[in-house]
Image (cartoon, rainbow, N blue to C red):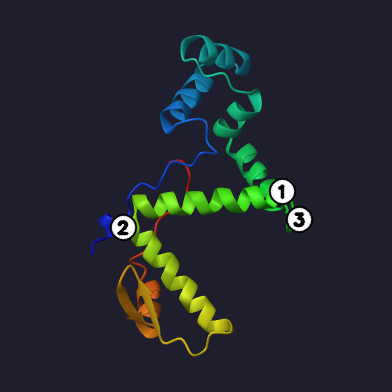
Amino acid sequence: MTWFSVMKTPAKDRRYKLTAEDIDTIRRLRKENSLNQTKRILAEEYGINISTATIVYWVNEESRKNKRLKNAKRTYVPGSEESKRRIARDADKRRANWEADPDMKLRHKLQQAIDEDKQDNRFRHTITVDGKTYTLDEAKKIIEGGTLKRKNRKMD
């Protein structure tokens, strides 16, 4: 397995309404125009109708950093409707990523088995993923080897 076979594009993140090309266009227009002009040009010429806050998020690194910090502090009430929707959304995204890149399914299943072993399943000695069986030691070597890592980013 080569590094390139692991770095496949994950499934589309449905939370994003803009493409990487849209973001490049926004950044280019914002360098050349005021915020209001940029918003007007996007709506009229490109059919992209977005808020001023979204434009600022994508063109201002400090704004994006602050928003991400704020989002990271968000808490969810266990069992709430919001929490249930979030869990379902994340599970759907994970399954879509596994279809786009089966190596990520392998990584997830191996890591899950290793984490279980640390907690209460001390008698588990093998892990079977898609018909292939791994020992716990093999699983740890694969995970620690780094061949199943992918960059964690939504947009380039």
Q: Position of residue 87 (x, y in %)?
A: 60, 54
- On screen, residue 27 versus residue 130, left or right, reads right
Query: Along the polypeptide, which appears first: circle 2 or circle 1?
Result: 2
Q: Amino acid at mark 2?
A: Val
Circle 2 — which element?
A: helix
Q: CA distance from mark 3 to mark 2?
A: 35 Å
Q: In terms of depth relative to the viewer, which is nearer, 117 or 60? A: 117
Q: Is residue 148 left or right of residue 64?
A: left
Q: Earlier in the sequence, mark 3 or mark 2?
A: 2
Q: Amino acid at mark 1?
A: Glu
Query: Badge 2: how crowded within 10 Å, few (<14), some, or many (20+)?
Result: some
Residue position marked by numbered label 2 in the rendering? 6
Residue 60 locus on image (x, y percent) = 59, 34
Q: Which mark is residue 77?
A: 3
Residue receiving disc 1: 81
Residue closest to the eye, 28 or 105: 105
Image position, residue 104 (x, y; %): 39, 60
What residue occupies the far front of the structure in this picture? Answer: 131
Identify the residue shown where x is 35% and y is 49%: 100
Mark 2 → mark 1, Cα distance in angstroms: 35 Å
For label 3, the SS is: loop
Residue type, label 3: Val
